[in-house]
Image (spheres, rainbow, N blue to C red):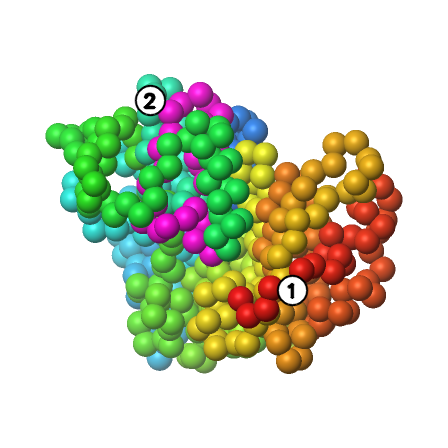
Amino acid sequence: MKVVIIGGDAAGMSAAMEIVRNNKAAQILVLEKGDVYSYGQCGLPYVINGKVPHTDDLIARDVEEFRAKYGIDARIFHEVTNIDTKLKKVSGVDVNSREPFEFLYDKLLIATGASPIIPRLENADLQGIHTVKTIPQMEALMRVLPNVKHVTIIGAGYIGLEVAETIRERGLEVRLIHRGKRLMSALDPKLAQMVLEEARKHGIEVLLNETTLGFKGATHVEGVRTASGIYETDLVIVATGVRPNTQFANGFAKLENGALIVNEHMETSIEHVYAAGDCATHYHRIKRQMDYLPLGSTANKQGRIAGLNIAGYMQKYQGIVGTSILKFFNLQIGMTGLTNADADQLHALVEAYEMEVNDIASYYPNVRPMKLRMLVEQQSRQLLGMQAVGENGVDKRIDVFATALYNEMTFEDLLHLDLAYAPPFSGVWDAIMQMPKRYGKK
């Protein structure tokens, strides 16, 4: 069996390793557009402040290890530009030489990930405008940062906030420009206000409700032009989201953003072709529909399931509940399940519960408050979502609540959980077990 995998990062190489382990007869060819395999994209921002000493530390296995140890034909600088699903053939060009190539497959996995969205802005081709999705992009940024005093970041999602923190920790001046009315738009306004206050406390200039129009400069960026005026800066980082890399995959069923629609076996709409990771859809267990929430953890899990199915073991991907967490200076910001906007789109009848609780026992030293917001379905009392912001303990509560969501538990079921208790870790009633004030319809 000839297996071709397009993309050599999380989903692609998780699949490749499952095929290696479970189908010794398979011939595996991986076509990677760049020259870096299997690295931790989520760790890239921490190269900026030195918590990750070098980009090499993010590489789990290099291309030579895949070739020599596992017998995978791992190619670099091979860009796929077309798939002929009738002839079961992929074609493309060598990135450096521009020489064409063609390969036949029996099974094909598309694991091409996603790329940063660069809005159509005036002078967007100026030098000094960066994105931080890949190791080469981060290395390019690190080469110029020593000569920079002021950085402007466009976008205030996960990457925007992580980069703002790590650049500020280098001692540089940082400005955040965001077109929304609050940082991290998915957060409830009260929780988002905590994030805004944390940013300002650490000296970050935050501009909300700002529409970016373009950039000022001759050859190198010198400022950002918005509807309100021009803001001078030495360097710009664009962090306005990502788009699935599926432009070459014609004839497949896709979401509006281009994500390839897959079933529970990671099969696309065309026979013998699979997709996984940031280029594919993710089934949302709470929404009960296909969604798009690109995360490294999801990509690895989907890649594993795709690999097992390609190897001949019928496995099902169980979906996501929308769990994520972010560190921003002294704050932990976590969420899982539905947001207010999600509930509105689904026309769900929802009650909201808000509370401020302690992360550990109130009498134990260094107790810290955290704010929680839960969404509960009115009639069934089924849990729908939770957001939490605090200095400590958010990760534990989000993970417990995500597990409860996965198992379709009710609000009252939380009181029966047997959670770990000792004063340094929790109160006798854990934070998510304390009966909050009932706010009614969100």
The picture places residue 166, in percent across and down from the top left corner, at: 48, 31
Q: Which residue is mark 2?
A: 148
Q: Which residue is mark 1?
A: 438
Magenta segment: 161-186
Q: Is residue 190 magenta?
A: no
Q: Is residue 251 visible?
A: yes
Q: Amino acid at mark 2?
A: Val
Residue at mark 2 to residue at mark 1: CA–CA distance? 50 Å
Residue at 71%, 65% (x, y): give it.
404
Label pair 2/1, CB-CB below 8 angstroms: no
Q: Amino acid at mark 1?
A: Arg
Under circle 1, the secondary element is strand
Residue at 49%, 48% (x, y): give it.
192
92 versus 221 height, above or below: below
Q: Is residue 164 magenta?
A: yes
Residue at 71%, 72% (x, y): give it.
410
